[in-house]
Amino acid sequence: MRIGFGKVDITPRVGVELCGFGPFLNRHSIGVRDRLWARAMAIEAGGRTAVVVSCDLVAVVLPTTKQVRELVKEAVGLGEDAVMVHCTHTHSGPATHNSLGWGVPDLPYMELLPRRIAEACIQAVRNLAPAELCHAEVPCEGIGLNREQDRDAPPLEEVLRDDWRPAKPELTDTRCHVFRVDSAGKTIGFASYFGCHPVCCCAQTRYIHGDYAGVATNMLEREMPGSVGLFLQGAQGDVNSCVVHKPEKEALLALDVIAARYANAVRVGLREAKPVAVDSVACVRHRVSFPTLPLTVEELRAMLAEQEAILSRPGASDEEREVRMATVYAVSLRKLVARMEAGEKMEPVSEVQGFRLGPVALLGAPFEVMQAIKNDVVARSRHTIPLVMGLTNDSLGYAPDRDAEARAGYAARMVPMIKGMLPLKGVHDELVKVLLRLDGALAEA
């Protein structure tokens, strides 16, 4: 087995619009607190090479992923199935995907981004060297809470106590997976896997950084000079960090506390990690579509009329959140009506991708995956260490679980409109089925 790492700075210039937290906030960055990185790990075994790159970004879209793959193929000859582009989902980085009103991507930055991500992958492949992969699964507590069950975060003074735990830890990740890579007697890189929204810093914060995951990874890299560390985002669709929606000063101070908690867990994993036998690598990629609610064009026009009534109300002001949100709905609904009238296929088409590294399965989905979906996949996986990774290769918004879909709230109904999509139907069961089919294909490859 040979393993290599690569790392490229993808920090945007100050002034680009940041992503998330509300309609048309004009949340432009005013400084860089921590650099953003594309960090890649390549593994070669049994005559096959695969490379996964983790980016300190909210998400990428499939056209960006395709550009990265083309550049990597041209430079080092890897096929499309062997390149996986993953994102940590920081909300304190540049807007990089199509979410109407939730931040406008900066065109010069987006032109350069695929080349930068590809360069990290190319470095990783060119740095391949004999190495040993070690793994540990360790406790990781006091990071997140399930926002679908606990709508409001506890007071800041409470969650910053070392002994704070959520009321229902079973609805969050309480353990993380840690991988250490040793070569020629030293640690050359590591990866950690955990599921929690990186939203310690929110609408009132304007500094660029990778949130708790990026700050912790940067910290651990400094402790191991020459190493490169990847953060792999798990099921975070319904799990927020325990500090969220605080004023800028409080959020930035709390960021270091949450990052330190995560780094402490990863340190334990790095110490306890045991060798993993990887005799082969497998790569599988499936093109998939996801069913949507069977809304008619008449229903969409009725929804549009409701939003246009808000916009045409006497005295309506763009300072009102209701007006800005109605704008999101109206623009999206007009496009959906036009597509439906043109006879276009309304179901979103994307891909799922998996890597098998010995007993480890990386199962990548283009969603913000909720915990219950991940739990169902893990329980039925054919692999010893199955890792369900959201925000991989594309961005289709949330994969709500059955309960969230029944509530028909933000994740199930609002976000699809922000993304210019119809709401999904039964995505819990559909995504479980798709990922288990991927898992099976990897086991047999």
Image: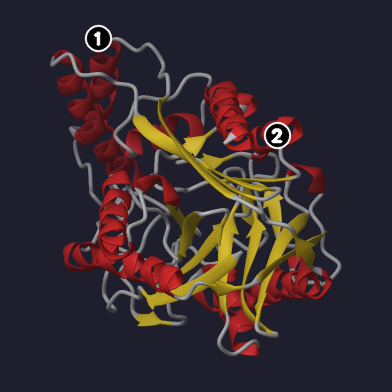
Q: Residue at x 21, y 35 (%)?
A: 331
Please name the residue shown 24% across and 27% down the image. 333
Residue 153, quarter of the rendered image: bottom right
Element class at badge 1 = helix
- Residue 404 location in percent, x, y? 59, 29
**Drawn side of residue 166 relative to residue 129, left or right:** right
Question: Residue 191 placed where, x, y %?
Answer: 62, 66
Q: Which disc, if any, is residue 119?
A: none
Position of residue 44 relative to residue 229, above or below, is above
Is residue 136 positioned above or below 61 on the image?
below
Q: Is residue 328 visible?
A: yes
Q: Amino acid at mark 1?
A: Glu
State the image coordinates of residue 161 (x, y, percent, origin top left).
80, 72
- Inspect this view and state whether residue 247 appears: no
**Distance (Cα) linking label 2 and label 1:** 42 Å
Image point (43%, 40%), residue name: 397
Quadrant (top left, top right, bottom left, bottom right) of the N terminus: bottom right
Look at mark 2 in the image and give the residue it sits on.
381
Q: How many marks?
A: 2
Of badges 2 and 1, nearer the viewer stands 2
Local packing at callout 1 (Cα closer than 10 Å; few below 14, some 14-19, many 20+) is few
Q: Which residue is mark 1?
A: 298
Image coordinates for residue 386, horizontal then vertical, percent: 68, 44
The C terminus appears in which quarter of the rendering? Answer: top right
- Residue type at mark 2: give it: Ser
Measured along the vertical axis of the image, is residue 129 above or below residue 240? below
The image quadrant of residue 444 is: top right
